[in-house]
Image: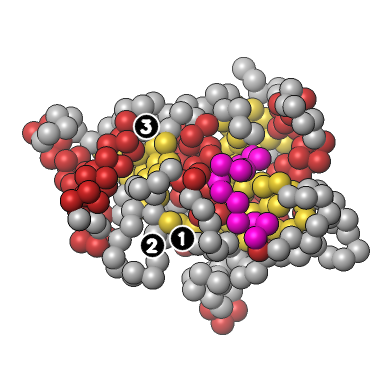
Amino acid sequence: MHHNISLSQFITEQLRHSADTDSDLSALLNDIATACKQISHLVNQGDLNGTWGNADDDTENVQGEIQKRLDILSNEFMYNALNWTGHVAGMVSEEEELPMTIPEFYPRGRYLALFDPLDGSSNIDVNLTVGTIFSILSCEQGIQPTLADYLQKGSEQVCAGFVLYGPSTMLILTLGQGVTGFTLDQEVGEFYMTHPDMTIPEDCQEFAINMSNQRFWEPPMQQYIAECIEGTEGSRGKDFNMRWIASLVAEVYRVLTRGGVFMYPYDVKDPTKAGRLRLMYEANPIGFIVEQAGGLCSTGRERMLDVAPEDIHQRVPVILGAKNEVNRIVSYHQEFDACK
C-alpha cells in the first residue's frame, strides 16, 4: 500500500514536477495540516474539555448562525497556524466578516487562504462528522490584499482540500493533478496517503438532498427528484437510494468514495439567500476537488468554477457529483429557463 507516503512527501513530490516549484505552497499546506491536527484533537475530545455547545451569549457569526465554541477555537487554530509564517498575504474565514490581516511585524507571502474552519458544526452535538474546508489562491508577493484580490473565480485556485473529523481523520487534497486522500495516524501525528486517485463514477443511484425543502424548489429540481423517487417504475428505470447527513464534507467524501450526486439547490424559502453554501470557501474548493475526480459541480445554471464572485461570503446553489446526473439536472434547468 501507499501508507508510507506522508502528506509532506506527497506535496513535495507533486510540486517538484510543476512548472513553478514552490516551497512556500508546500509549507503552507503543511501549516494547514498542523491546524487541522489541532482541530481534530479538539473534536475527538468531545465534551470532555467543555468546548461543545454555543459560544457565550449565543453570538452569531457573519452568516447569522449561532457560533459554537468549537467554531471559534477552530478559527483561532487556523489563523494562528498561518499568520506568522510569511506564506500568506491574508485570509478569509466563514467566522469573520472581513478578511483577516497579517500582523504588521510578520512578512506577507504570495498566497491567500480561504477557509471554513469547522463545517457542519451544527452536527457536533450529535457526534456526526464535521470538517474543515480550505481554498488557496495566489496574489502578488507581499501585498496588503484588498477585497478585489480575494474575488477570484474558482478556476484560479492553486489548490484546495478538506479534512473530515470522522471515525478517522482524513485530508482530501487536490493540487490540480487529481485527488488524493490521506488518513491521520493519531499516534505518529502524521497524515499518510491511503486513497490515491479518487474518482467519481459517471453514473450513480444515490442522491443527497434535504427533502424537507421540496416545496421551495424550482420545477427542474422537483422534476429530477420526482423521477428518482419513481424508481424502476419511472422514466429512469432504476431505483435510487437517498442520503442526507447535512455535513458538506461528509456528503462530498461519500460521493468521492461511493459515487452519487449531492444537491443544495436554489430555493425560494429565503429569497435573500440564492443558495445556502458559500462560494469562496465551500463551493469553490469542493468544486475543484469534484472536477479533479472526474465529476461535475454546477449552480444548476453555470459551472461552479466559472462563477464570478461579488462578495467573499456570497452564497450559491450547489449540484455536484456524477457527471451524467449533474448534466441531466443542468439540462432540466436549461429547458425550464428556455420556457420562462
Which residue was labeled with disc 3?
323
Most foreground residue, 158 or 53:
158
Relative image position of residue 244 (x, y in whole percent): 34, 49
Is residue 149 in the magenta section? Answer: yes
In the picture, measured across the screen, residue 34 lies left or right of residue 58, that is right
User: Dot 2: what SS?
Assistant: loop
Identify the mark nearer the N-term, 3 or 1: 1
Q: Which mark is residue 274?
A: 2
Relative image position of residue 182 (x, y in whole percent): 62, 33
> Residue at (55%, 24%) from the top-left corner?
197
Relative image position of residue 162 (x, y in whole percent): 58, 44
User: Dot 1: what SS?
Assistant: strand
The disc labelled 1 sits on which kind of residue? Arg
Relative image position of residue 189 (x, y in whole percent): 73, 39
CB within 8 Å, label 2 to label 1? yes
> Residue at (66%, 40%) from the top-left corner?
158
Most foreground residue, 3 or 265:
265
In the displayed structure, 178 sits above or below 299; it is above
> Residue at (77%, 31%) from the top-left corner?
20
User: Dot 3: what SS?
Assistant: helix
> Residue at (65%, 56%) from the top-left corner?
150
Most foreground residue, 158 or 125:
158
In the displayed structure, 192 sits above or below 31; it is above
Q: Which mark is residue 104?
A: none
Q: Pointer 2: residues within 10 angstroms few (<14), some, or many (20+)?
A: some
Q: Pointer 3: residues within 10 angstroms few (<14), some, or many (20+)?
A: many
Identify the mark nearer the N-term, 3 or 2: 2
- The stretch in magenta equals 148-160
Which residue was labeled with disc 1?
315
The disc labelled 3 sits on which kind of residue? Lys
